[in-house]
Amino acid sequence: MFKDFPDNQRYKVVINHEEQYSIWPVDQTNPPGWKDVGKTGSKAQCIDYIEEVWTDMRPLSLHRDLASRLRKKR
């Protein structure tokens, strides 16, 4: 996923409205729809952070849909 990003650059962790994470070069403006999480560092450090905090890769909209379906079954 991050293979196209060079290892010798500083990155920041970004998140979108679906609570999906990615990394982005610190010196570049975030892509539309992505905001800073507050974590910066090497490529490896940022990827390690994402692996630690992003334990459920399903998009937020899917979480909400599943929760709604569960409530309706009760």
Image (cartoon, rainbow, N blue to C red):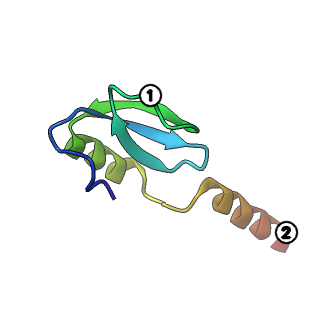
What residue would you read off at disc 2?
Answer: 72
Please give left or right for residue 62 compared with residue 68 in the image: left
Name the residue: 60% across, 50% down: 18
Visible in this render: residue 56? yes
Nearer the camera: disc 1 or disc 2: 1
Identify residue type, mark 2: Lys
Taking 58 as reference, is 12 left or right?
left
Give x and y (percent) for residue 61. Answer: 67, 57
Q: Secondary structure at mark 1?
A: loop
Q: Up-down: is 43 above or below 62?
A: above
Count of marks placed on residues: 2
Residue 74 visible in image? no
Give the quarter of the figure containing the C terminus: bottom right
State which quadrant residue 45 falls in.
top left
Circles 1 and 2, Cβ within 8 Å, touching? The answer is: no
Can you identify the residue that label 1 sits on?
29
